[in-house]
Image: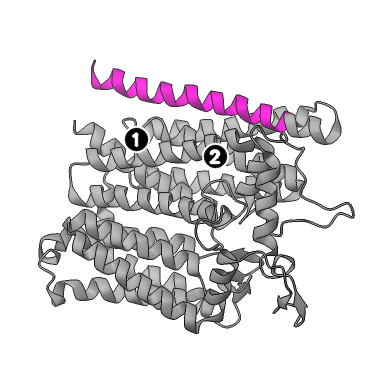
């Protein structure tokens, strides 16, 4: 089979899967309409057509710019965004409209990135220190007086000119680019663990960690630390670095638990979400059962998942508000959207959703293995591992496997910053995949 026929086969396969995603989107919105209004509306078809047209445009860009790229990643991203916006619409129509706009922005930047970097994305390697400094600057933005805001105990957000965004989502991409470029250049010297070669790496990483700790952003701190260790291991193949990093993390976690009230609270909620006797409630200043105060969100989330059972209640039929209209799970469309999906789709649907994430990660790691240069391998591995670890952190927190942290479920949770950043991540993987397949 010639190269042209192979290219057409990849892109035609991608188009077919996107059509399937469009059909599933229409079915999902129709299910929500029927459950909420007891009728079938043309609105459900309108949403499906809108999403198919949007991803058709993204497909045309990939066909023109990265014809040899993996044909499965874009359809899987489309499926995840469709699942997310369907559930967000079920929880609140106005939020679904905003999420749809952010998806449009994300696809636009995705297309722009592919077009600008289609000839050789490796030019990014020349600006590695700018990306490293940019990562720190973006993390520091929420600390700037007047524009930084604190939400749910963590100072992560920036409010400028009526727009609110989370710069840490983009800082993650910047840091991965810096690490890929620096580790590619210094990996042989890093294997010798010489201070003058390890120094710049530790300075950039340490500065990121300090900003994250000062912001009480535990989820992103774990995410950045994990990405750093994973990429360091890929570059050097030295398990001693990984073991040393884990020891340092555990020691730092213990100190943080003892010294930082926010960390102590999160660990306590994780270990003992229920109490039979009333304890001090920081939000009211009085006494209350922990499940009625600090661990309220987590406990209600676990009840939501249990209520879904094996087959789920059905889209649009879950219970997320009390009889008087009070929301049972705060931040259900962002931090706890997995528990909402688990209730309405059940164990089967929630497991299928995780399977899509696993397939996305598997394709990303395959791209990293196929890449024929160090920078591309490290970039694809870093982007994929960051995606995988972020998914594990939020799902693990919701399921009470690890302490709960406030990060988003990629492509699914409500939030413009996360959606846009993940589309840039997707563009990076497709660029690496196209180059890897073109050279075979």
Based on the displayed image, in which of its 4 quarters is residue 223 positioned?
bottom left
Tell me the element at label 2: helix
Residue 123 quadrant:
bottom left
Residue range highlighted in magenta: 1-30
| Circles 1, 2 touching at the beta carbon (< 8 Å) | no
Residue 60: x and y in percent read 45, 31
Q: Position of residue 149 (x, y in %)?
A: 61, 75
Residue 40 horizontal side relative to residue 131, left or right: right
Looking at the image, can residue 65 be seen? yes
* Magenta region, main secondary structure: helix
Residue placed most toward the observer, 352 or 383: 352
Mark 2 = which residue? 80
Residue lying furthest front in this view?
A: 276
Q: Quadrant of the N terminus?
A: top left
From this viewpoint, is residue 133 visible? no
Identify the residue under disc 1: 66
């Amino acid at each position: 089979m010639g190269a042209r026929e192979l290219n057409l086969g990849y892109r035609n396969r991608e188009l077919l899967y996107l059509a399937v995603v469009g059909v599933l989107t229409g079915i999902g919105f129709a299910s929500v309409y029927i459950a909420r209004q007891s009728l079938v509306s043309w609105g459900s078809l309108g949403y499906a057509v809108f999403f198919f047209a949007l991803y058709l445009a993204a497909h045309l860009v990939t066909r023109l710019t990265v014809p040899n790229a993996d044909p499965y990643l874009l359809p899987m991203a489309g499926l995840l965004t469709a699942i997310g916006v369907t559930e967000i619409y079920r929880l609140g129509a106005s939020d679904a409209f905003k999420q749809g706009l952010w998806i449009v922005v994300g696809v636009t930047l995705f297309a722009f990135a592919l077009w600008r970097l289609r000839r050789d994305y490796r030019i990014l390697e020349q600006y590695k220190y700018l990306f490293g400094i940019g990562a720190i600057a973006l993390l520091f933005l929420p600390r700037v007086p007047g524009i930084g805001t604190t939400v749910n105990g963590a100072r992560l957000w920036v409010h400028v000119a009526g727009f609110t965004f989370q710069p840490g989502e983009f800082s993650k991409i910047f840091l991965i680019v810096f690490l890929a470029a620096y580790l590619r250049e210094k990996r042989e010297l890093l294997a010798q663990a010489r201070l003058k070669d390890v120094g710049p790496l530790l300075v950039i990483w340490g500065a990121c960690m300090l900003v994250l700790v000062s912001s009480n952003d535990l989820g992103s701190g774990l995410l950045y630390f994990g990405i750093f260790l994973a990429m360091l291991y890929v570059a050097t193949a030295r398990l001693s670095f990984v073991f040393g990093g884990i020891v340092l993390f555990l020691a730092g976690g213990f100190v943080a638990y003892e010294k930082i009230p926010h960390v102590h609270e999160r660990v306590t909620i994780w270990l003992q979400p229920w109490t039979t006797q009333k304890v001090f409630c920081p939000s009211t200043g009085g006494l209350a059962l922990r499940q009625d105060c600090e661990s309220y969100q987590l406990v209600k989330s676990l009840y939501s998942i249990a209520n879904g059972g094996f087959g789920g209640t059905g889209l649009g039929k879950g219970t997320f508000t009390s009889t008087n209209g009070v929301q049972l799970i705060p931040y259900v469309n962002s931090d706890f959207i997995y528990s909402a999906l688990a209730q309405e789709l059940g164990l089967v649907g929630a497991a299928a959703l995780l399977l899509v994430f696993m397939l996305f990660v598997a394709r990303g790691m395959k791209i990293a293995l196929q890449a024929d240069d160090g920078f591309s391998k490290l970039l694809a591995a870093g982007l994929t591992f960051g995606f995988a670890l972020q998914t594990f952190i939020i799902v693990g927190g919701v399921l009470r496997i690890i302490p709960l942290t406030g990060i988003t479920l990629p492509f699914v949770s409500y939030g413009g910053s996360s959606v846009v950043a993940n589309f840039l991540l997707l563009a990076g993987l497709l660029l690496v995949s196209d180059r890897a397949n073109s050279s075979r």
